[in-house]
Amino acid sequence: MLEVGLGSVAIQVSPEKLRLVIIGASNIVSDLFDCALANHLIPSKVVLHLPEDGGERSIPLAVRTAQFTLVCPPPVIEQFSEFQPAPGEVYLLGPTTPTRAVLAAELRRRFDLPFCTLVHPTAYVSLLAKIGPGSFVGANSVIAPGALIEEHVFINRGVTIGHDTRIGAFSRIQPGSNLGSLSKLGRGVTVGIGATLVERLVIGDNAVIGAGSTVLDDVPENVVVVGTPARFLRSVTNPVFRSGPPPPK
């Protein structure tokens, strides 16, 4: 039997019946399905909610899914308009940008899906850490005691999260990043490849930490910082999360 975390709930289903469905495509779909195989899940389906990225440096989804013929039947590609949940499926979002919050809200409205938490077997997650539903932890990452990872956080390969650090919903932590202890990251934060954040920092909603940067001081919401030490570069355009009281109805 295989146990897959669904927030505060854990379900047990035979590996032959448990199928992972990725909703929304991105260039990390292969990473998600690779992690699924490492956890004895069946890579089942990719549901497209937007047209694929046709950039010249992107790899078409059909090419990515075809790679799985070496180890298992390739995942099916399905349009969002055709999607209906089925028994024996668990779900994870494919996009990693903070705008996936819109997709998650739409899925909750339509289907109330049980998002799983997917952790690579080579990652270490302390028994005293908490990881919210819909989050992903990549290979060789370390999450220390007391850390709190909120829902739909994407933690890539080789990341270190210090003790008692909190990462807000829909944030993404890119490969090789190091986050010090006792820090608090807001919602929709992006930490670039190989960035380092010292301990006891507060990072505001929607903030972007550039690749390779070293952050020594708090970062306000809605800004991009880069460099060593990290300095303001520009403001974030069209932030996903907004602070303050909600607008009147």
Image (cartoon, rainbow, N blue to C red):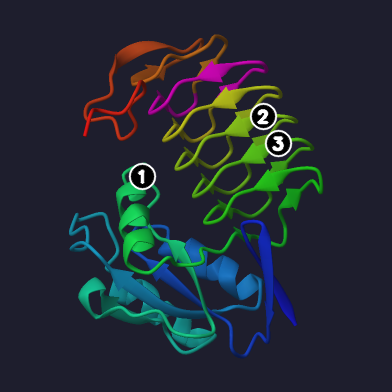
Which residues, given as a range, are shown in magenta?
Answer: 196-212
Are discs 3 and 2 less than 8 Å apart at CB? yes
Picture residue at 22% right of the left edge, 26% below the top: 237
Give the residue at mark 1. Answer: 97
Q: Amino acid at mark 3?
A: Ala
Which of these two is toward me, 205 or 216?
Answer: 205
Whether residue 81 is situated above or below residue 109 in the rendered picture: below
Give the residue at mark 3. Answer: 147
Which secondary structure, mark 1? loop
Q: Residues within 10 Å of mark 3 (few under 14, many from 20)?
A: many
Whether residue 53 is situated above or below residue 15 in the rendered picture: above
Mark with earlier residue (1, 2): 1
Q: Position of residue 133 (x, y in %)?
A: 56, 55
Q: Residues within 10 Å of mark 1 (few under 14, many from 20)?
A: some
Which secondary structure, mark 2? loop
Distance in Å between CA atoms under marks 1 and 2: 21 Å
Q: Position of residue 102 (x, y in %)?
A: 30, 49
Picture residue at 72% right of the left edge, 77% below the top: 2
Q: Amino acid at mark 1?
A: Thr
Disc marking residue 206: none
| Closer to viewer: mark 1 or mark 3 | 3
Disc marking residue 165: 2
Position of 84 with respect to 67 (left or right) is left
| Closer to viewer: mark 1 or mark 2 | 2
